[in-house]
Every structure is written in C-alpha cells, then in structure tokens.
Amino acid sequence: MDCSTVSAPENRLETLTSWDADWAGLRVVVTGIGKTGFSVADTLAELGAHVVVVAAADDDEALAHADTLKIVGVKDVLLGVDTSTVLPLVGGEPAQLVVTSPGFKPTHPLLAAAAAVNIPIWGDVELAWRVRVKTGRKTAAWITITGTNGKTTTTTMVESMLQGAGLRAIAAGNIGTPILDAVRDPEGYDVLAVELSTFQLHWTDSLEPVSSVCLNLAEDHVDWHGSFAAYAADKAKIYANTQIACVYNAEQIETERMVQEADVLEGCRAVGFTTGIPAVSMVGVVEGLLVDRAFIAERKDSAAELAKISDIGDLVPRHLVANAAAAAALVLAYGLTPEHVRKGLQDYQNGDHRIQPVASADGVLWVNDSKATNPHAAAASLSAFDPVIWIAGGLSKGVDYDELVQQQAPRLKAVVLIGADSTGLAGSLARHAPKVPVIQTRAQGGRHSDAAVLRGDSVMAEAVAVAASLAADGDTVLMAPASASMDQFTSYAHRGQAFIDAVRELLESRASANKES
C-alpha cells in the first residue's frame, strides 16, 4: 500500500489519554534506537501496539537494543542510514502514528513524509504524558523546566527540594532518566521534575504541568529549528496548559511575553524570579537572602525568607542564584514551604562540568564549565570571574559570538582556542577584543571523526599547558567553550573530564618537579 495516499485516524489518537486506553494494534513507527527510542518502543510494545523501529545506527549497541526489542514484542527493527530515511509500512499497512526521538529534525525525510500525509508525530514526552495515568499506580504531578541555559541545574534543584519535603520525586526528561522510564516506575512518583529541550517541546501538545518555567532565551540550535523565531516559539510551549504558576525571568522580557501569550488553565498566575530585589508576585534576593513575595498573604509590603544564598554553596555566581529562585518559585507553587526550599538548597549538589572548581594552585583558580555549550551559558560563567584566561571553541551550531565577546572583553586576559574550526569565535575576538592575546591550539580534526575524538585529549592538554604559561596569581583559567563538543570529543562530559585530567596532570608534574629541585 502507498503511504502517500493515506491519512491517519486522528480520532482514535484523541482517546489515547491513559495507560488503560486501547493501544492494542495501533500501528506506530518509532525513530531512533538510543535511550529515548528504546524507551518509546519498549513502552508501546508493552501497551500492545504494533511497532516498527527505524534508526540510522547499526553498531553493536544498536544491534543489542534491536534484539531486546524484538524479544519484548516489537514487530521489526530497521537499522542503517538507507532505511532510516524511509517511512515504512507497519504490518503491510500505513502507520497511524510516528513517535520520534528528539534528535530528528522536523525536516528529516521520514518525518517530512509522515507530515505530508497527515500522520501525527509525537515525541517521547507527549507519549509519557498520555500514559501517565494507570489504574493501581500513583499518578505524578509534573513540574516542567526549559530555557537556553540552566535547565539541568534548576531541574535538579527542584528535585532536591521535593525530596527534602519527603516526596518521592525524580528529575527526568532531557536529563538522566528517560521520562517514560519514570512514568512506568512500578511504585510511582509524587512529582516529576521534567527538563525539556526545544527538540522535545516541538513534538509536545497535551502537557498540563502544575508549574512551568522558561529560564532564559538566547540564540541556540538554529541549525535544528531553522530560525531563532522557531526556536523561541518551541520554548514558549512550556507554558501551555499550566495549572497553577507560569514562572518567568523578570530580567528577560521575552519570557514574560511568553507567559502573557500562553493559553493556560483557569486560575493559573504569573510569577517572576529575579536576582535583585523582588516586586510583588516574584521570588528574588534581599541582602544575601532568597525571599518570596509571591506565595505569602502579606506580599504587598513584606517578603518571607526562603534561604541564605550561602546555602547554595561556596561558589555562587549570579546565574546559580537565578536558578535557585526559579526552582523555589516552581515548588512553592506546588505547595512546598520555605523550610523545604532551604533544605533542598542545603542538600543540593551541583553537577559536574558546570562552574566546577577543579583546582587552586599558586593563586590560580581552574574552573571547568564544559556544559557552557553556547554563548549565553559562557557569558554566565565568564561574568563570575575577573581576570580570566578563557579556553573556548568547538562546534558552533550556527550561533554568533559578537555580543558575547563585546560584553566580556574587559575581563579577558587571554583566550586559548580549541575546536576543529573556531574561525567564528576567532573573528569575533579580532573585531571586538583586538588587544586580547588569542592562542590557537595546533591539533585539529574534522567533526565526528575517530581521529578527531582521539586528539581531543591532546588538544585539551595543550590548551591547559598554554593557559598555565599565561596565568598568574589572582587569575582564573576558565574552560567555558561556548560551543558544542562533538568535533573533538564524544560529549561535553568527555571534554570536561579531559580538562580535569589535564589540569591534575599539569599540577602533579609541577609538584614532582619542585620536589626534585
């Protein structure tokens, strides 16, 4: 049968709003066989759907996943680049639904083919929302978080606050646990702290979170979305159908406009967060204290203390304060108390590779911020230190660096460039920081090549050595690349660990040399 002549029966899909609905026999194509695609296919097979998985990967891991999925009831798994671009039939008939992994662009040939014949396309988050209700299992409330930067930090802060209140809660979605694995947990959760990327939000329409936030908005992932306007529109979807509070960044008007334009549930209110003194209906900061002027009866003329900024940690840059304020607003909307917020912040452990102090020696502080994969994130960490020897560069994702360099130039002592092609960043430095020394590492490599990844460690070792030769008492060496990592590293975590290893090896070598002398 020719898929191009068939439309999907959307009426049936409208009835699929719980685990107990009639999913049996639904013909579904699942794209991807990584962590997300596997969880989607596994879930649908358990529900009794007829599933065909399509993925470009055909390595040992993909083959192992394919074998497992066939055991649990997936009808077919089609691996390889050639088959991954074709919309397959399911049991000899056209698919009724496509569920895609977030890495697939809307312009991908398979997704474009489905859209052309009106076959609905969901993401894993949409599917998870629709199956969250199951007879005999606890149904979790959802708190949803997005933003160009700070998503993971805020999500894990929310998780810590919820757990500090004695609730069974977990961070899921674009972080750690796949959202479908969290939803299917046999015991069930009280609350899910759900981090959402724009890739996930693009394919999501039905969510009704208790509270939601877009932390900030800056140019990123233009290559996936096609334009900044499209990227921003997908970010704004976080607020749709929110039940109690849409939390926005009072220091960025774009997020407030998103709330103003959102179609929310009756009774939902707007709550701002700020790193300054809060106005009414905001959470903010007064004299080193995180305070609430949104969820107390006397908010017109007073504020309630939530925590000390020092409760967050020893090194608390401004963006981390903003994340804490946003997290507090989200959980206060759910019903937590100031005591729960304070305990959550005191118990919170900031993750690796985000403003992570690695070492301090001879008056030089070494900081790993490999998670700064775009200019906005890099600006947040650069702003916390002065003077800075900045290790930067990598896969640019089509962003512009001019504004970042213009803002941060006064604090830059020197820049050490990594990355297979950092010409965009180098050009911005030449235009807007012409007096700042820029040193290019010698090792180069093409995107995603095995040789490039193998050279990543040596590139970082060279960058660290160069930075050390430039650093003096009072300086900070900050590795905040403002770029993605996949040109010379397998991930941002690999890049961060390469930095940590290089710094430790350098300092150990110096210590040994000093002993011998």
Image: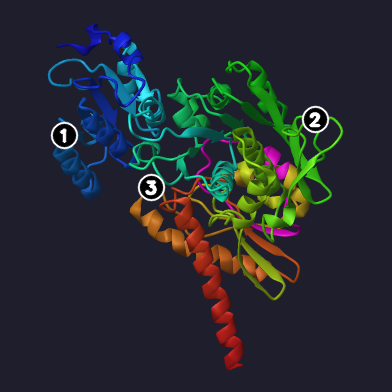
- Specify the segment rendered in magenta: 383-406
Residue on which disc 1 sits? 73
**Residue 234 against residue 344 in the figure, above or below:** above
Sequence-first tag of 2 and 1: 1
Q: Position of residue 304 (x, y in %)?
A: 78, 42
Q: Position of residue 517 (x, y in %)?
A: 61, 93
Q: Residues within 10 Å of mark 2 (few under 14, many from 20)?
A: some
Q: Is residue 336 visible?
A: yes
Query: As shown in the figure, which amino acid type bears the numbered disc 1?
Result: Gly
Residue in front for this viewpoint, 98 or 210: 210
Query: As shown in the figure, which amino acid type bears the numbered disc 2?
Result: Val
Tell whether position 239 is magenta.
no
Residue in front for this viewpoint, 447 or 19: 19
Sequence-first tag of 3 and 2: 2
Residue in front for this viewpoint, 163 or 85: 163
Numbered disc in front, either 2 or 1: 2
Q: Position of residue 33 (x, y in %)?
A: 28, 38
Q: Secondary structure at mark 2?
A: loop
**Residue 471 against residue 119 in the figure, above or below:** below
The residue most toward the bottom is 517
User: In the rendered structure, are the residues bearing label 3 and label 2 in contact, judged by CB atoms less than 8 Å apart?
Assistant: no
Q: Secondary structure at mark 3?
A: loop
Residue at horizontal 18 percent and vertical 11 percent from the top: 2
Kindly identify which numbered label has been placed on residue 486: none
Position of 509 with respect to 79 (left or right) is: right
Q: Secondary structure at mark 1?
A: loop
Tell whether position 405 is magenta.
yes
Sequence-first tag of 1 and 3: 1
Q: Quadrant of residue 243?
A: top right
Residue on which disc 2 sits? 280
Residue on which disc 3 sits? 448
